[in-house]
Amino acid sequence: PLPKCPDTQHLTDMANRVGNDQLKALHDAKELLTKQITEWQSHRDLLQERLPRWKQLVALLKFASDLPIATEVQPEVNAIEQNRKLLANPDAVPGLLEKLTDALRKALKDVHGKCSADYEARMSQLEVAPAWKQIPQPERYNILSDNSLRILPKIAVGTTEEILETFRHTKLDALRALNDALPTRFNNALAAAAKLLEPKAQHVTLPGCTIKTEEDLASWLAEIEECIRQKLKDGPVII
């Protein structure tokens, strides 16, 4: 996104001269060189100020690819890059960065909040389950660890840099996948606890079915009953 490097052929030409010829060339170009030095120093200072924000913008945009804000911000980012306008005035980057930061902060808080609420609710249900209450604490710890339920990923969303740091460890799609997986993981944890109490117990997953009529319901219940009856021959059944 930076402007093209300035032409410095005249500096090369002066450097190749010697003695009085070089001094004369420097004297003749004094005003031009003074102007260029001031301009280049200004560009250097502006670059040092703007480049960190540009890098944050580009990094955040990668994490927002599946959010509506990306379709708004991406064309403007492309324009800055293609037209080499990072040092142009007014500076468009801070506004774009703020939009992305706000959108990603909201997305992270929404997904993580939903995941945390579901986790807390299911953990509360697990803790009052008879089988869970009967097993010792070390076994509970092991079961939670085996099912990746001991702790939830933490997020920090206060500043742009905190959001970037969060995304380096936890992506939005990973949080969504975790939320989708919580029911299965907690069911597996409860089944593992029951298995400890009843070593021969078998975990049975109920078959899925679309029920539209009373007959559909009766048929599904009959199928479940027969499945459980068969499993009971080999020991207790966990549903």
Image: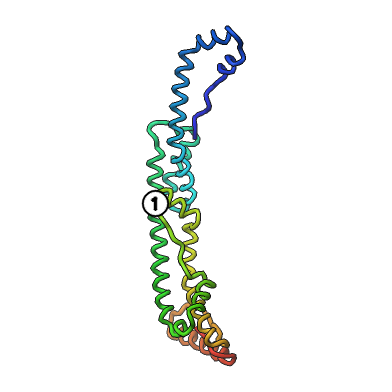
Classify 9 as above or below 79. above
Q: Is residue 161 visible?
A: yes
Classify 121 as above or below 78. below
Q: Is residue 206 visible?
A: no
What residue is shown at x 45% (from left), y 80% (from top)?
A: 211
Going by the image, does 20 lie left or right of 76? right
> How many residues crowd mark 1 within 10 Å: few (<14), some (14–19), many (20+)?
some
The residue type indicated by label 1 comes to Ala
Classify 10 as above or below 20. below
> What is the x, y in percent for residue 237?
53, 87
> What is the x, y in percent for residue 143?
52, 76
Tell me the quarter of the picture where residue 110 sits: bottom left
Q: Which residue is mark 1?
A: 103
What residue is shown at x 57% (from left), y 88% (from top)?
A: 231
> What is the x, y in percent for residue 141?
50, 75
What residue is shown at x 53% (from left), y 27% (from top)?
A: 5
Kindly give the residue lying farthest to the bottom in the view shown: 233
> What is the x, y in percent for residue 214?
43, 85
